[in-house]
Structure formats: structure tokens, C-alpha cells
Amino acid sequence: MIGRGGYANGGYQPSRPKKERKLTFVSRSCPDSQHCSGVNSLELSRDGACLFSAGRDSTIKRWGLKTPGPTFECSLEGHTDWVNDVALLDNTLLSCSSDTTVKVWRGNTGECLRTFARHSDYVTSLVVAPLARKFISGGLGGEVFIWDLESALGVSDGIRFNEGQPPLEANGHKESVYSLAVNETATMMVSGSTECSLRVWDPRTGVKQFKLKGHTSNVKALVLDASGRRCLSGSSDNTVRLWDLGQQRCVQTFAMHQDSVWALAVDPSFTKVYSGGRDKQVFVTDLHTRSSVLLFKEEEPILKLCLEPEATGGDVWAATNSSSIHKWFSPVMEADDPSSGKGGGGWGARMFSPGTSPYNQGRAPRLSTAPHFLPPPVQSTPTATIPGAPSIVQHTILNNRLHVLVQYSSGAVALWDVTRGEAVARYGNVSFKEKEEELQEQVSMASWFTLDTRLGSISVTLEPPSCFSAEMYAIDLNVAGASDELKVNLGEQVLRTLFSHWLDRR
């Protein structure tokens, strides 16, 4: 006889308590065609006809660029936290998120094909090697995984044959990984981390080749040239460095920024680098002449830069902490012609030299920084804008545990009803503190949900048994035809509302 919790072999193991499941739902006040929080990453199709944006609102948006103005095409939803990076491998879109997963999507339809949950912490960076059909992911857990797309999906010649093969792991990082770069043939890979160094790998074996030191803070951005010989790195030490991987040394340091460098992009010939970061400024630097120009300045810190193909203009798309995305004109970088009669008012008047002397063996480089007073940027207005919606930056759950007072990045204040998932009052740009004091009631209600606004909108989490601990009279909830004695369990009411349409479809 086998007793409760016993085993036929006579051994006893205590039964594990059943883990209760929790449910989180998001109430957004903006349409699917808008981000409602910062945009972490951008990715352009090779022909420049399509742009993907990865948002802190947990969504990915696809935009068509064939028309004179960007047009919304679809929203890809499946992640449950910030989407930190996206990359295209032909028509396959890859994304990574703070929900610790990597997802594979059909780029043309938005269908999610597969979700990988190998990382132990936020996944921060994702790059692809299109000619080798590989992609690489890295995150705060220090893991770097090298994936073969077809093997990971378990597909051969378009036919699924198994559940997919595990990735190759590049072991060695002791701290969080924030940036990755790989060449198109996947013969060289570089990773950057909070260890203030670059690790260079052979992605075919996952073996570390060597380490490059020079930065004094987190390495936040990396770019490799097609050959895998030259690498550019951007760091929170405010510098951009050019490395020769064959010689295993830094050959140039650029210090045009006044704060952390978070984003890098290079032209196809690897002669011009665009850099942006926390100082909200984007510089273009000629790697041959070592001259820099302040191209434009955003209103928020720069998170990602993306260059259009030269055939479509070669302009620059910029993603920032704002929910809007801007496109900026990228003119030809050249000094003034003395015979033009401009009097130094063109490019030449805006150029400066932020470079250092190349490393000499055994000698540290001399670091020259940007001038204290920079010339004005080349342009002050973007050529195109994909508008976003204001994000929630402050909130308070009122004592009745039914309403939430929120303030948006625009300054507007609104009142949300948690059970209805919508704003029930909008007050405009008023004092948040004064409105909170006005609306607070001297009532006591059980805490039946948790709430956060990390995604720029209201995320409500229900977790048993506490989510069923609050009740209200139905007449106070404006339930039509309800008797004076009828009480409604708030958790049950929300769940019924959430799943009513699902039950109808079943």
C-alpha cells in the first residue's frame, strides 16, 4: 500500500505544495499604433522598406517606409516586460526582453514562432550573422548564447523535425553583458560588459580568444566591420574607441561626448561612426580624418541609432527614452570650401577633432575632448517623426483600492478604475499631490492587487488568495438592477470581465 506522500520502494518524500498562479493584465490608454514608453531598439530591413521598433511598453511595432511618411503596419505582442533589442535575419525577426526570453517571429505577419527561456536574467543584447544563419544573445546573468536559427527552431528545409537544439554557450563573463557584435560570417564575435573590457570570441566554438582593456566603465555599444578585424566600442566612460582586433589593441579614442555613450552606428564602408548617448547628442565622426560634427540633439537620452541604406538616403533613425521615434537627415560630411564665400559658417565651422594619438607601444594615449562650447548642431528639426503616446511616470493607489491616480509624461493627471481597465476622469495638467489629497477617502479596503507602471501603462497583478479578499456593494459599483444587499468580489469580477470574450469564443 502506498500512503499519502509515500513511494512504492518505501522511501518517503514530502509532497510539494501546489504553487498558485498569478495573472497580470495591462490597461493601455493609447492605440496599438503608438508606443507608450521609451523605445530601446530599432531595426531596418535591408531594403529600407520596413522599420521595427522595440519598446519599453513590451511591444514591437512594424512601420512601413515606402510611403512619404512612416505608416503603422502591426504590433507584435508576447513579451511581458521591456523589449531590449531586435534583429532581422532575412524575414525572421528576433527579439529579447527583460522577461528573460528570446522570441522568434515571422517578420511579415508578426506570428511568434518560438520562445526561448535559457537566460537567467534580463536579456539585453541581440545580434545576427546573416550569412551564417546564426544569432547571439547576451544578458545581465553574464550568459552569452550562440544560436543556429534552423537548429534552434528544429527546422530543416522548411519542415520541423524536432523540438530544437540547445545553443552553444560562450562562458567567461563574470558580470552583466550589455553589448554584442558579430561579423556576417560568424567568424568573430565581441562582447562588452560591466567588467569595462571587451571579450573577443570564436562564435564557431564559443572559445574566448582574448580580452581588450582600456575603457573605465560599462561597455554599452559595439560594432564590427565586415571582415571582423576592426571594432568600435561605446562606453559609460564617455568615450568611443576604435580597436584593431588583429593587433589586439586600441588604435584611437574619441571623447566628443559629455556623458555615457549608449548607441553606435557605422556606414557600410566603416569610415563614419554615428554616436549618441546620455547627453542626448548625436555626433558623426570621420574615422580617417578624425573630425567630428554635432549632427543633432534630441530631447531625451539616445538609446539606439539606425542607418538607412545608402540607396534610400542613408539617413539616421534615433530611438530615445521618449515614446516617439525621429528620423534625421544625414548630409555629406565635408569641410567648407574657402572659395565658397561662406565665411566659415558651414561644416568647417562645426568640425572639431576629438581624437587621440594612436596607441604607442607602452605609452598611454593623449585624450583630447570636445570643445567646451560646441557649435550648434547641423540640424535642429527631424525630417520625419513616428509619434508616441505619453507614458505614466507617477501613480498612487487610492484608499478605496478601486481607483488609481496617474500622471503622464505630458504632465496630465487622470483617474483610472482598476475593475474597468479605463480612465474614468481626466483633470489636465494639475498638481498631482493636490489632486491626490482631494480624492483620498478615509476608508479601509483589503489589498487585493498589486500595480506597477514600469511599461508606461497600468499593469495589474492578481495573485490568489489575496486577490479574492476584497468585496464591495454592487450598487457602489453601479451594477444595474443590483439589490442593496448584493456584494461583489472585486477579484472575481475582474476575472470574469477579462475572460468573458474568451469563454464566448470557446
Image (cartoon, grey):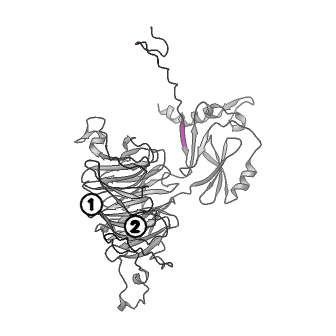
Left or right? Give the position of 32 relative to 180.
right
Mark seen at residue 240 = 2
Q: Residue 234 appears at what percent x and percent y? A: 41, 63
Task: Say few, some or many: other residues with alpha carbon within 10 Å of mark 1 (under 14 / 14 to 19 / 20 or more).
Answer: many
| Residue 137 in view (yes/no) | yes
Q: Secondary structure at mark 1?
A: loop
Work out whether residue 365 or residue 203 is closer to the camera in this orientation and state it: 365
Magenta segment range?
1-25
Residue 335 is situated, as x and y percent measured from the top left of the image, at: 36, 83
Q: Earlier in the sequence, mark 1 or mark 2?
A: 1
Vertical placement of residue 437 versus 450, above or below: below
| Numbered badge on residue 114 | none
Q: CA distance from mark 1 to mark 2?
A: 18 Å
Which is nearer the eye, 139 or 27?
139
* Residue 293 locus on image (x, y percent): 41, 76
Residue drawn where x is 24% and y is 51% of the image: 132
Callout 2: helix, strand or loop?
strand
Q: Is residue 69 visible?
A: no
The amino acid on which the numbered mark 2 sits, given as a three-letter code, is Val
Mark 1 is on which residue type?
A: Gly
Question: Magenta: predominant secondary structure element?
Answer: loop
Q: Work out which residue is located at the far top of the displayed protein and give it.
A: 1
489 vs 366: above or below: above
Percent x, y of residue 99: 46, 44
Toward the front, the furthest residue is 362
Query: In the current view of this chain or complex, which residue is farthest to the left?
Result: 157
Tell me if residue 353 comes above or below residue 462 in the rendering. Answer: below
Indicate which disc residue 228 carries. 1
The answer to whether residue 19 is magenta is: yes
